[in-house]
Image (cartoon, rainbow, N blue to C red):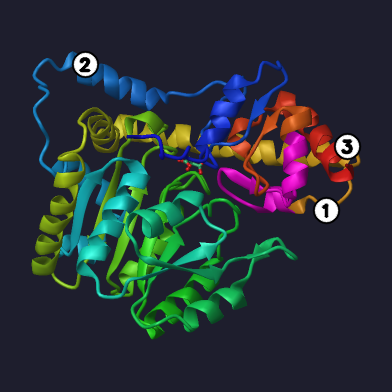
């Protein structure tokens, strides 16, 4: 009966890790997936997370019962506070419905399904370019109509601010607009605070529904509050909006799949009903979320010592990524690689959008065993000081070939 089932194409991001694992060359480098690595190229479990886990294991009173459909209420409340801030009036008024999800992807997926069922305008604007999975989630899976808004200017390698304003200004009233809260993936280009004000104005004028994707809070600047500034700006303006949160990168909980979806409503009563409908989306999909990752997050966010330690470690990861940007740019200058590489240090977050063409990316992988996405994105978090020179030589060879 499955004779007609075609082979699914490899995933543009996760498929790269498979190819990397299959490569036997000792010089290989995986800059494909956005996952933090130490200077030694190893995955990192944060000390704050280790300590939280030890305390969880030591606590013999914990059981393995099902969670409610919406997950752990304390986790949801702490996640809301982390994103919207301790002083958020919408949160204090009970206007934000939050549900624990399977990381950021699960948050987007539940949010998209909720929109499909309960929101009249079925058009979603995605930045061009955006994280490849956004299209799968909002388009293929939820069946919403996808449109692009201009975001990256390949000439300046910065934000196409005028293009963005004009595309969103022409959007149908009420359309959903996906905004990367910080550390735009894949470009590493974020709007300035003034530009965010301009985006807010057009969102208000067109009555658009913002859907923030926050996968890097604390990673972009090393400061949790600064990286939430755009979300808080929009919430303070009184807008109804959605927020997808992930703890994959900022707490290093990739495989634990822990995140949250929040929906801001105009009143507490609506928020209660929205919460019930988010749960109704969850029930037929996976019934209820897992316990362990959320329990770690609760410990880290609620214990002042662990929270302080986490912030230090977060700042440390962010600093190492920044140092890799500087090291790579320096190495490119040293090997006399043609072109201007200022954007490597100007961009922020986990990724650098190198500007390499698809053919150049293929050369990086086929000849130099450097694994990266074919749009020219590299995960800076996967690079080490020791490999910066090798990487620069690979880029130079690819640019010249
Ligand atoms: C990435 O963009 O590399 C990460 O967000 C991992 C993923 O799931 O794609």
Image quarter hosting the N terminus: top left
Marking on residue 57: 2
Marking on residue 340: 1
Which of 216 and 401 lies nearest the eye of the viewer? 401
Report helix, strand or loop for mark 2. helix
Report helix, strand or loop for mark 1. loop
215 within the magenta span: no
| For marks 2 and 3 on the same chain, the one whose residue lies earlier in the sequence | 2
Residue at image position (60%, 54%) is: 187
Q: Mark 1 and mark 3 in contact? Answer it, CB < 8 Å.
A: no
Query: Alpha-carbon distance for marks 1 and 2?
Result: 51 Å
Return the x and y of residue 325 as percentages of the image width and height: 69, 41
| For marks 1 and 3 on the same chain, the one whose residue lies earlier in the sequence | 3
Characterize the local packing of mark 3: few (<14), some (14-19) or many (20 or more) Cα atoms within 10 angstroms: few
- Report the residue marked by disc 3: 334
**Is residue 64 shown left or right of residue 161?**
left
Q: Which residues are magenta?
A: 343-364
In this rendering, the label closer to the viewer, 1 or 2: 1
| For marks 1 and 2 on the same chain, the one whose residue lies earlier in the sequence | 2
């Amino acid at each position: 009966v499955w004779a007609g089932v075609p082979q699914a194409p490899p995933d543009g991001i996760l498929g790269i890790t498979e190819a990397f694992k299959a490569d036997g060359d000792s010089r290989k480098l995986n800059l494909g997936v956005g996952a933090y690595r130490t200077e030694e190229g190893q995955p990192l479990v944060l000390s704050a997370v280790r300590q939280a886990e030890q305390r969880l294991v030591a606590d013999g009173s914990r059981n393995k019962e099902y969670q409610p459909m919406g997950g752990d209420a304390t986790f949801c409340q702490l996640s809301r506070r982390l994103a919207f801030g301790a002083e958020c009036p919408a949160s204090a008024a009970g206007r934000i419905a939050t549900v624990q999800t399977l990381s950021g992807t699960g948050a987007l997926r539940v949010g998209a399904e909720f929109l499909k069922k309960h929101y009249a305008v079925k058009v979603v604007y995605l930045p061009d370019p955006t994280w490849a999975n956004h299209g799968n989630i909002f388009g293929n899976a939820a069946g919403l109509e996808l449109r692009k808004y201009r975001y990256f200017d390949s000439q300046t390698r910065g934000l196409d601010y005028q293009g963005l304003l004009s595309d969103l200004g022409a959007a149908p009233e009420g359309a959903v607009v996906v905004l990367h809260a910080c550390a735009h993936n894949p470009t590493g280009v974020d709007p300035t605070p003034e530009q965010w004000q301009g985006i807010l104005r057009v969102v208000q004028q067109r009555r658009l529904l913002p859907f923030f994707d926050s996968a890097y809070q604390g990673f972009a600047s090393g400061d949790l509050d600064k990286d939430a500034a755009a979300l808080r700006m929009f919430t303070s303006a009184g807008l109804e909006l959605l927020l997808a949160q992930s703890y994959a990168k900022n707490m290093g909980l990739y495989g634990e799949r822990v995140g949250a979806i929040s929906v801001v409503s105009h009143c507490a009563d609506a928020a209660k009903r929205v919460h019930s409908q988010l749960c109704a989306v969850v029930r037929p999909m996976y019934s209820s979320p897992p316990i362990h990752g959320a329990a770690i997050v609760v410990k880290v966010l609620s214990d002042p010592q662990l929270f302080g330690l986490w912030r230090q470690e977060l700042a440390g990861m962010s600093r190492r990524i920044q140092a890799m940007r500087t090291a790579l740019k320096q190495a490119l200058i040293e090997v006399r690689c043609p072109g201007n590489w200022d954007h490597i240090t100007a961009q922020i977050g986990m990724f650098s959008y190198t500007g390499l063409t698809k053919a150049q990316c293929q050369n990086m992988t086929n000849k130099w065993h450097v694994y990266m996405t074919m749009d020219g994105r590299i995960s800076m978090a996967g690079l080490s000081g020791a490999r910066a020179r090798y990487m620069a030589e690979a880029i130079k060879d690819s640019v010249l070939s």
